[in-house]
Amino acid sequence: MLRPTLLLALTLASSIAHAAAPPTMASILAEAPAADWQPIDPDQLLVLQLDSGRVLIELAPAFAPEHAANIRKLAQQGYYDGLAILRVQENYVVQWGDPAGDGDAARSLGKAKSKLPAEFDRPSAGLSFTALSDPDSYAPQTGISDGFPAARDPASERAWLTHCYAMVGAGRGNAADSSTGAELYVVIGHSPRHLDRNITLVGRVVEGMDKLSVLPRGTGALGFYEKPEQHVPLRSIKLASTLPESERPRLERLRHDSASFQRLIEARRFRREDWFVHPVGRIEVCNMPIPVRAAP
């Protein structure tokens, strides 16, 4: 039987060791209070159905209001249902659209707009933004805004979304204002930040990236599939808010303006778990996780 003094010493040592354990992403999320989580609006959540499963995309109307509204309209009309993934380029993007292209056989946009302004950036005034303290090669400042990786320029007072993994953009031609949201792509490779402020980003995949990242790569130029039989069919893209209650996904993301998110930033900047030999002490915007969970 242990002596009381020895038992006390062991208990204190255990408590100190536990208290000194470095915070991890898992421990921070486990401790995050309910108030630090924010529901994802089902009216801004797309449910993409593939043969392999579903992919959920949160739209970003704060940054691309015209595109988000047009995409919602297209989804409500069933425009995307039966279209196809036409391009999978290694270390770059997955892209889908109308296999008929934009010729006479192309699917009608219906009541959706056929002309939208380029929404490459927006005024930074009034935008909720949690800045990262580390320098960035592509922007004066980066951070997280409304659940999306973003950047801003204090001199011009403009802000924009950044091309990180899982971000969704609207394909366009040479004209800056030639995108409608009818053709969309998802970043599946190393962050192509050179595209920032050159294409309208419309949202982010919050569930199901594993369904996109494993697709067969296209063998044609820029990763396009060369034969129709290679196309990956889109069974449907619906708004979550239009689905029956029993089928509607309910998700929450960690608020970027919460104390838990601030703890997470520092924990990811200084990885102090036993495995790490050299904690980096910095983080860049595309390496900053934006946690999403099923609503309890």
Image: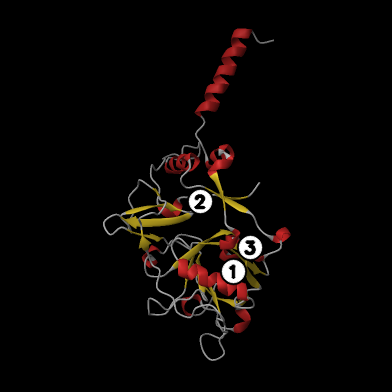
Q: Amino acid at mark 3?
A: Ser
Residue occupied by mark 2: 290
The image shows residue 162 at horizontal and vertical percentages of 41, 60
Q: Quadrant of residue 161?
A: bottom left
Q: Amino acid at mark 1?
A: Leu
72 left or right of 144 in image: right
Measured along the vertical axis of the image, is residue 19 above or below residue 2? below
Residue 54 visible here: no
**SS under mark 2:** loop
The mark tally for this picture is 3
Mark 1 and mark 2 lie on one chain; the one further toward the N terminus is 1
Mark 3 and mark 1 lie on one chain; the one further toward the N terminus is 1
Name the residue nearer the viewer: 227 or 105: 105
Query: Residue shown at 47%/54% (left/top)?
Result: 146
Name the residue nearer the viewer: 133 or 241: 241
**SS under mark 1:** loop
| For discs 3 and 1, the disc positioned in front in the rendered view | 3
Badge 3: how crowded within 10 Å, few (<14), some, or many (20+)? some
Residue occupied by mark 1: 215
Callouts 3 and 2 close, C-beta under 8 Å: no
Query: Residue shown at 57%/38% (left/top)?
Result: 33
The image shows residue 171 at horizontal and vertical percentages of 46, 74
* Label at residue 69: none
Residue occupied by mark 3: 241
Q: How is the image coloured?
A: secondary structure
| For discs 1 and 2, the disc positioned in front in the rendered view | 2
